[in-house]
């Protein structure tokens, strides 16, 4: 069921978009605001270091100057205690100061610097990503404007891709009785490898300094999309109604977003409906014709997001579709930044955002990822790393973060896709969940379209460390879809791909997760059935996978530890580290003993050991007949029992199937590429609609 999709609504939204596109800095009609300096109004204690911090003296690290510095290891054996102490002291630093004695947030767009204090806006959300604009657009100058009142100075700063900091201009402020305007133009030079623009602000010893309405603007003539653009948002949800409603409320409250928004396609695939939540009716009334609420059967993330993409193409009024997770917390300014950046890109470009941990709000999980096509595994972009804490290590003091990171794809927690790209390459693969975002990014890349994961654009999302897909039904989709992705985007089966297949089976088998081994068997079988089977089985595959996991000890979970007998011992990881070569040798010996042995814990009357979720590595299960294992989310416990004979059978069967898969790879690849699984026509049949149906 869909509501609020009238053509009148579309026309109204386009008018708002046109008005917004012509909005410029007062007195300079040829400039368009593309980045507003904003401050948080909620959860400030948790996220303020992402917006503003106290200024401290910059420190230059040796690797900024000497690229060979990273080539040399540390000789710990020759280090005395004094040298060790110096090493630790240079590595450990306090979190950035965001105390109320330094500054106060007055509003979404205004900050007050207290007397004698200095702040820096070289932060994740408020530094302008100049290097990205230099690389992907034709913008050659950026204008900074702000209003300031009080006594002090505003200093415009810039960095290079190496993280070297430079002062551009210092503007004195002496305006005690009203706000004075600041305007500085910054040329887009020395930015090919990266770099940011930002401002620092210092208040005099005798008076506070207030700054408001600070923005970064670019020349309108550099805009690729000369006509006004608008966008739709695709949100898919499954039994997370409160999270989804919060996301809708956040969007509804932001005027800048709504000025460019056509509609939100909220696809509800659950049984606990968003529309039944208290407050939904009020939010729907506020959004009015900018909300299209759709109910459909559970087709996973790929089906929910594809529905929003499908509806956007059918309506033919939006320039972009933004995919946005239902359980994410958005910074609304990120949404509009992504749209405005896309408007200026030289050619249609996918613009993605980073993901901050929801349970540790200043830690960025990822900003830019690439794919190793030899084994179809994602990893951080070159020079990037996972889990960067911007509270302890702010952008200003992390030279490696100032370089430009090039991506192969962006996670669909937040990703803006031009409709032109969707028309050309199709929608998501119909694979329910997992690898739909990776495959789409690779498909776009192969078609000549880039993905840019833009700093300053991000959401907060539930962290992956509270999940362990290998202990759930998700492992089937993770492996099956990775192999499909390999068929579509790899030239041939590589030794790395085969190694990954074997390695996955070994690690989960040594952890006594035999249900996952069985799911791998199903995944191999289903992939080799061909693309038509993948299409036909999409609506029913989840139920089949759930049923296939039944009967294994690792799937027979209980909500409480006391539901099982007390374990004979608690696992404790050895405190003494060993060389990697010795760890690998131990792993090989453990595997051989398991493959050749007949160990069994089927008749155990109590678990031999209890293992916490954090410690569920293969080391914890060595020599144990059974183990009491806590789930990654901490909500259940399983009594996993060793069965070496079962492991041997499952492992050898999967290796046989892996070998068969590799032999059939060329023929299968040809079938999958010819099937065009992601086409709009295929999705129309899945949705039970025709592409030409009018609203």
Image: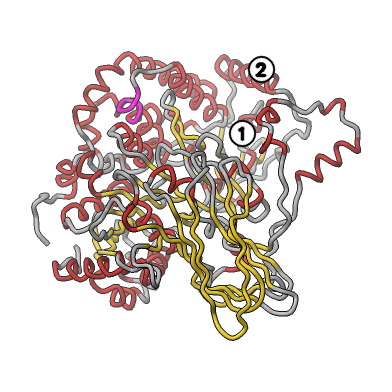
Packing grade of label 1 (10 A; few <14, some 14-19, many >=20) is some
In terms of depth relative to the viewer, which is nearer, 681 or 396?
A: 396
Q: Secondary structure at mark 1?
A: loop
Q: Are marks 2 and 1 in contact (CB under 8 Å)?
A: no
Tell whether 192 sits left or right of 113: left
Q: Residue furthest bottom?
A: 177
Magenta range is 485-490
Residue located at (38% from left, 40% from top): 434
Image coordinates of residue 108 in percent, x first then y, are 50, 73
Does residue 462 show up? yes
| Residue 647, x across and y down, in percent | 50, 23
| Colouring scheme applied when the structure was drawn | secondary structure
Location of residue 218 by image quarter: bottom left
Q: Position of residue 288 (x, y in %)?
A: 26, 74
Residue assigned mark 1? 617
Quarter containing the N terminus = bottom left
Give the spatial CA distance, label 2 vs label 1: 15 Å
Residue 585 disc label: 2
Would residue 121 be seen by someone viewing this image from the given angle? no
Q: Quadrant of residue 157?
A: bottom right
Secondary structure found at label 2 = helix
First-in-chain label (2 vs 1): 2
Q: Position of residue 630 (x, y in %)?
A: 59, 45
Q: How many marks?
A: 2
Instruction: Say whether residue 157 is left or right of residue 472.
Output: right
- Circle 2: is it few (<14), some (14-19), or many (20+) Cα within 10 Å? few
Name the main secondary structure of what is drawn in magenta: helix
Residue at coordinates 25% horizontally, 66% vertically from top-left?
18
Q: Nearer the viewer, residue 257 or 210?
A: 210
Location of the C terminus by quadrant is: bottom left
């Amino acid at each position: 069921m869909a509501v609020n999709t009238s053509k009148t609504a579309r026309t109204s939204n386009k008018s708002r978009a046109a008005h917004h596109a012509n909005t410029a800095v007062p007195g300079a009609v040829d400039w368009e605001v593309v980045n507003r300096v904003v401050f948080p109004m909620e959860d400030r204690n948790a996220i303020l270091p992402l917006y503003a911090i106290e200024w401290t003296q910059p420190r230059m690290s040796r690797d900024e100057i000497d690229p060979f510095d990273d080539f040399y290891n540390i000789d710990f054996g020759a280090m005395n205690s004094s040298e060790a102490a110096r090493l630790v002291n240079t590595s450990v630093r306090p979190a950035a100061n965001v105390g109320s004695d330094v500054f106060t947030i007055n509003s979404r767009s205004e900050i007050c610097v207290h007397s004698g204090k200095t702040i820096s806006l070289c932060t994740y959300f408020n530094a302008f990503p100049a290097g990205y604009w230099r690389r992907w657009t034709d913008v050659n100058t950026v204008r900074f404007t702000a209003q300031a009142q009080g006594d002090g100075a505003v200093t415009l700063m810039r960095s290079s891709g190496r993280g070297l900091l430079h002062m551009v201009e210092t503007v004195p402020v002496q305006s005690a009785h009203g706000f004075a305007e600041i305007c500085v133009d910054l040329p887009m030079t020395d930015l090919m490898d990266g770099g940011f623009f930002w401002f620092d602000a210092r208040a005099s010893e005798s008076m506070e300094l207030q700054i408001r309405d600070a923005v970064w603007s670019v020349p309108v003539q550099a805009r690729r999309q000369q006509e006004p653009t608008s966008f739709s948002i695709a949100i898919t949800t499954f039994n997370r109604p409160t999270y989804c409603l919060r996301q809708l409320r956040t969007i509804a409250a932001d005027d800048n977003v709504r000025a460019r928004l056509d509609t939100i396609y909220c696809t509800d695939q659950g049984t606990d409906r968003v529309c039944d939540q208290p407050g939904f009716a009020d939010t729907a009334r506020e959004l009015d014709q900018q909300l299209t609420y759709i109910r459909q059967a559970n087709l996973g993330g790929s089906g929910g997001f594809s529905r929003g993409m499908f509806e956007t193409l059918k309506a033919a009024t939006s320039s972009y579709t933004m995919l946005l997770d239902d359980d994410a917390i958005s910074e609304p300014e990120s949404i509009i930044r992504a749209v405005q950046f896309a408007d200026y890109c030289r050619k249609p470009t996918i613009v993605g955002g980073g993901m901050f941990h929801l349970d540790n709000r200043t830690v960025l999980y990822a900003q830019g990822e690439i794919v190793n096509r030899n084994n179809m595994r994602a990893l951080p972009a070159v020079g990037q790393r996972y889990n960067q804490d911007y509270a302890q290590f702010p952008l200003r003091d992390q030279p490696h973060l100032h370089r430009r990171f090039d991506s192969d794809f962006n996670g669909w927690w937040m990703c803006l896709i031009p409709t032109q790209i969707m028309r050309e390459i199709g929608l998501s693969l119909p694979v329910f969940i997992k690898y739909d975002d990776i495959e789409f990014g690779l498909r776009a890349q192969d078609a000549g379209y880039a993905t840019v994961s833009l700093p300053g654009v991000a959401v907060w999302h539930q962290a992956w460390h509270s999940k362990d897909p290998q202990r759930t039904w998700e492992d089937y989709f993770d492996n099956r879809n990775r192999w499909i992705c390999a068929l579509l985007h790899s030239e041939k089966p590589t030794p790395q791909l085969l190694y990954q297949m074997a390695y996955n089976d070994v690690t989960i088998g040594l952890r006594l997760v035999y249900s996952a081994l069985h799911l791998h068997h199903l995944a191999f079988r289903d992939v080799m059935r061909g693309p038509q089977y993948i299409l036909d089985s999409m609506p029913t595959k989840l139920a089949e996978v759930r049923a296939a996991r039944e009967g294994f000890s690792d799937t027979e979970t209980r909500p409480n530890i006391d539901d099982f007998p007390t374990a004979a011992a608690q696992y404790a990881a050895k405190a003494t580290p060993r060389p990697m070569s010795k760890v690998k040798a131990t792993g090989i010996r453990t595997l051989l003993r398991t493959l050749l042995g007949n160990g069994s814990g089927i008749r155990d009357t109590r678990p031999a050991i209890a293992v916490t979720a954090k410690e569920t590595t293969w080391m914890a299960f060595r020599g144990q007949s059974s183990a009491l294992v806590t789930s990654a989310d901490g909500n259940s416990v399983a009594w996993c029992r060793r069965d070496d004979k079962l492991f041997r059978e499952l492992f050898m069967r999967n290796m046989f199937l892996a070998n068969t898969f590799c032999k059939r790879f060329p023929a299968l690849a040809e079938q999958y590429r010819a099937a065009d699984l992601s086409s709009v026509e295929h999705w129309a049949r899945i949705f039970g609609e025709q592409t030409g149906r009018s609203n």
